[in-house]
Amino acid sequence: MITLTPTALNAVRRFVETSADPVAGLRISVAGGGCAGLQYGLKLEAEKDADDLSLDFDGLTVLVDPYSAPLLEGTTVDFVDSLSGSGFKFENPHANKSCACGQSFAA
């Protein structure tokens, strides 16, 4: 379904370790927005929803809602740290178009 690179996994673990709130998992989602129509979302969740797909990555739980699951199928999530900035990068085989800023996509 989804692949997290070791770099992304380490970055998420750092966020979980520094969170003041309890964390049930990392939610990866897709929602309407951006100039290309769809945007990725990442959020540390305190609770799992009943209809969430739950994925285990070496002890780290990733939560995906039923709407986002087919749009994220085959996606690789990486974490990039460079001079121009740092953040999560998505390689999605379903993205057939993205905006110039790279923050949204169409499927």
Image (spheres, helix red, strand yellow):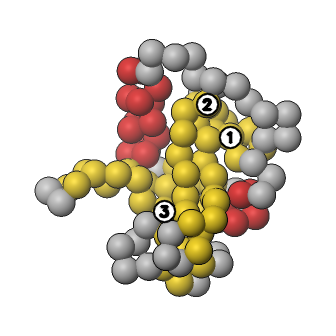
Give the quarter of the image for residue 51: top right
Instruction: Determine the CA span between mark 2 and mark 1.
Output: 8 Å
Instruction: Look at 35% across and 51% down and name the residue there.
Output: 87
Q: Position of residue 90 (x, y in %)?
A: 48, 62
Q: Amino acid at mark 3?
A: Phe
Q: Is residue 76 visible?
A: no
Query: Is residue 53 toward the left or the right of residue 23 in the image?
Result: right
Is 37 drawn above or below residue 88 in the view shown? below
- Look at the image and tell me whether residue 25 can be seen: yes
Going by the image, does 48 lie left or right of 95?
right
Going 53% across and 84% down the picture, which residue do you hit? 97
Q: Which residue is mark 3?
A: 90
Q: Which residue is mark 1?
A: 63
Tell me where residue 78 appears, x and y as whole percent: 43, 54
Please tell me whether residue 85 is drawn above or below residue 33 in the rendered image.
Answer: above
Q: Where residue 45 is drawn, which disc sits there? A: 2
Please tell me which of labels 2 and 1 falls first in the chain.
2
Disc 2 and disc 1 in contact, CB within 8 angstroms? yes
> Circle 3 — which element?
strand
Q: Which residue appears farthest toward the right when viewing the image?
A: 51
Quadrant of the frame with the C terminus: bottom right
Q: How many marks?
A: 3
Of 44 and 12, the residue lying toward us? 44
Sequence-first tag of 2 and 3: 2
Quadrant where the image shows the N terminus: bottom right
Q: Dot 2: within a 10 Å radius of its alpha carbon, few (fewer than 14), some, or many (20 or more) residues?
A: some
Query: Considering the numbered disc 1 on the image, is that residue within a helix, a strand or a loop?
Result: strand
Neighbour tally class for label 3: few under 14, some 14-19, many 20 plus, Cα within 10 Å: some
Q: Identify which residue is drawn at 78% across, 34% down.
A: 49
- The residue type indicated by label 1 comes to Leu
Using the numbered discs, state the Cα–Cα distance from disc 1 to disc 3 in whole angstroms: 16 Å
* Pointers 2 and 3 in contact (C-beta within 8 Å): no
